[in-house]
Image: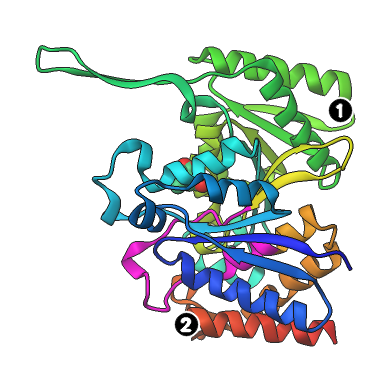
Amino acid sequence: MATQKLLLLPGDGIGPEVMAEVSRLIDWMNQNGLGNFETETDLVGGSCYDAHQQAITDATMDKAKAADAVILAAVGGPKWDKVPFEARPEAGLLRLRKDLGLFANLRPAICYPALAEASSLKREVVDGLDIMIVRELTGGVYFGEPKTITDLGNGQKRAIDTQVYDTYEIERIGRVAFEMARKRRNKVTSMEKRNVMKTGILWNEVVTRVHAAEFKDVTLEHQLADSGGMQLVRWPKQFDVIVTDNLFGDVLSDIAAMLTGSLGMLPSASLGETDPKTKKRKAMYEPVHGSAPDIAGKGLANPIAMIASFAMALRYSFDMGKEADMIEQAIAAVLDKGLRTADIKSEGTRVVNTQQMGEAIVAEVAALAG
Ligand code: IPM
Ligand code: MG
């Protein structure tokens, strides 16, 4: 078996705790012939700022480029509220996404039946939910220039962010969504704000054209992003794949996370273009949740989104769909047995800490692997 080179970036807050549970799983897989992972760990975010006064170093970027996949936990926290904007923890994450060209962010929101009670919505609304949010990740208002705050000199300041999208950026994320839908329930809902934004008009036009030219077999619907947010909490099961821009995708995926019971449940994959020669693509895998500094170091964090993100790495970077399925089944089995971290606890369940949850999932993987 070829070695699979992973760069682990635990980051800040609960990051190191949840990453430790992925390391536990990796060690087990290596020891039991299910993988041949070679890992290296490095700094990103506030922890990198403390050591190097920047959110990620060039040396770490080089390692990220050389790795077969990057596994990142979370960055940020109040400790770094006052650091210069360019060096804030989130800048490390954004640089990784941008410099690795990770334009396609897949955020699957699955409600495990055992967790329907943990959602703030009624069971029938979320039970069995399985949707995929495809978020554009390297364009839009997060990266557009100008991005400035100017002093107007009269006691007023002016802040500018710029939302920019070129045709090719919309085409390629549209294709990812349509191809994804073909492997699922064959439906794409595109969300934008064409009623107020020029980028929304172009988004709608390009997605419609790509659909007509290449994906006629897939059902395409359009929704305005605000109304889409409303529909997501009203009746989320109407959706299969949702494709949307960077900012709307950020917001809508946090909403979707709560449908699944907790932000601690949602994994994500960020993928670049496939190299036509090597057939490889740059990729980073991270939970949707943040660094949760309020609960860091207490063993309260839910490691499931992190572990499920590693399962996505197996599926999308290493063609190890069978092993990925096994990890996802193990998560479901542990939940069925009533084990819960504090964020997803409900009556009649047993609350465990981060490490116990990680151990239980590894034990379940071992049982499934026979
Ligand atoms: C996410 C996060 C990031 C984002 C932050 C940490 C920069 O919220 O991945 O959803 O806004 O993209
Ligand atoms: Mg977010």
Q: Amino acid at mark 2?
A: Asn
Decide which of 1, 74 is in the foreground and name it.
1
The answer to which quarter of the image holds residue 287 is bottom right
Residue 210 in picture, x, y percent from top left: 80, 21
Name the secondary structure under disc 1: loop
Residue at 52%, 79% in the rendered image: 340
Report the mark closest to the observer, 2 or 1: 2
Q: Is residue 51 above or below residue 294?
A: above
**Side (left or right) of 64 relative to 276:** left
Q: Amino acid at mark 1?
A: Phe
Q: Residues within 10 Å of mark 1 (few under 14, many from 20)?
A: some
- Magenta run includes residue 309: yes
Q: Is residue 66 above or below residue 276?
A: below
Residue 262 visible in the picture: no
Residue at 27%, 56% in the rendered image: 79
Residue 56 in picture, x, y percent from top left: 47, 48
Some atom of ligand 1 lies within 8 Å of the CB belonging to the residue at label 2 = no
Which residue is under mark 2? 353
Residue 8 in picture, x, y percent from top left: 59, 62
Label number found at residue 96: none
Residue 278 visible in the picture: yes
Residue at 58%, 69% in the rendered image: 304
The answer to which quarter of the image holds residue 168 is top right
Q: Is residue 162 above or below residue 8?
A: above
Label number found at residue 215: 1
For the image, the number of numbered tags is 2
Q: Which residues are magenta?
A: 285-310
Decide which of 143, 3 is in the foreground and name it.
3
Q: Earlier in the sequence, mark 2 or mark 1?
A: 1
